[in-house]
Image: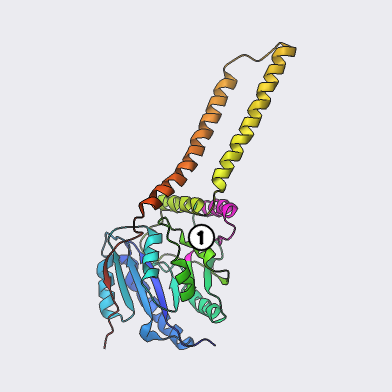
Amino acid sequence: MKKEFNISIVIPCNNEEEVLLDSVEKITKKLTNLAKKFKIDLSSSQIVIVDNGSTDKTWQVIKKLNENNIFIKGIKLANNFGHQSSLLAGLDNTNCDVIVSLDADLQDDLDTIDIMIEKYLEGYEIVYGVRKDRKKDSFFERNFAKIFYFLINILDQKIIINHADFRLLTRKALDNLKQFKEVNIFIRGIVTKVSNNSSIVYYNRNERKAGKSKYTFLPKISLALDGFTSFSLLPLRIIAFIGLIIFILSLIIIIYYFISYLFIEKTVRGWTTLILSIYLLGGLQIFCLGIIAEYIGKIYLEAKKRPRYLIDQILNQNKIK
């Protein structure tokens, strides 16, 4: 049996004033129940809430929670740096033995944390929370997820299907994660490189209680592109392979028309073949250049060495007497 340990629950949020009070109340209750069930040191445990450039009253809500809840540590970022960077800001600013990350809307099932801790006590360093199904998603979200995981598993087979950012990390795993220094960080992909000593727990995703999801179409596309270009050179190699195939087919067509001209003395004259070839090759070239541009863009962003996030203010835990 492991010795007494403390736990940090990290919550990145953006414009979540409608759900934050209720969510923190439930998380606080869960934290105290966990302490009764496991050997958790509540005096040093915490709930780290990161405000990722919210434009509503999210930060005011966090300040109020910090004044009245002994577990709350608030972090206000100077701007909106994206979900992955805000999550990383929370992970970087906790020193607990066990760290659980989840979304502010509590669509991630809190009761699953009990099973995660049991897995931790068994010796696992990372425990992934994975959705059992996507029945509650829209038709577009379900099929977008299927395509995303199908393609990204071609590039990196270690990606956990239907796992977002609901997971448990040990201090050792988190310290290893911090050694990855890229600016365009894709945590759900990188964390699979941190340790093979991991386990999976499955859960049913809850309905959102209030407000709207901040993961709209464009952020999902951006995250998908980061995932595709962060772990493999395979897209570039596919481009080279396609180019080789087209070159070989072109040679075959040239030989065919040359033989037709010499021996059959009859060739198809017209602009159809020429126009179709131009459009086919032109479209293929633009597509390939777009993929190459993604990689060059990543190099450009990494070369500038800009910070992944900037902290405007930190509210440390207020130990109420």
Q: Position of residue 9 (x, y in %)?
A: 41, 74
Where residue 251 sits, quadrant-wise, is top right
Circle 1: is it few (<14), some (14-19), or many (20+) Cα within 10 Å? many
Judged left or right of residue 112, residue 264 is: right
Q: Is residue 107 above or below residue 321?
A: above
Residue range in magenta is 143-165
Disc 1 marks which amino acid?
A: Gly
Q: Position of residue 173 (x, y in %)?
A: 49, 71
Can residue 151 be seen here? The reply is yes
Judged left or right of residue 286, residue 150 is: right
Quadrant where the N terminus sits is bottom right
Q: Secondary structure at mark 1?
A: helix
The verdict on residue 191 being magenta is no
Q: Residue at x 30, y 69 (%)?
A: 75
Quadrant where the C terminus sits is bottom left
- In this view, the residue in front, 206 or 94, is 94
Q: Position of residue 280 (x, y in %)?
A: 55, 30
Q: Residue at x 55, y 30 (%)?
A: 281
- In this view, the residue in front, 6 or 117, is 6
Residue tagged 1: 189
Q: Is residue 312 above or below residue 35?
A: above
Q: Residue at x 54, y 61 (%)?
A: 162
Q: Residue furthest right?
A: 263
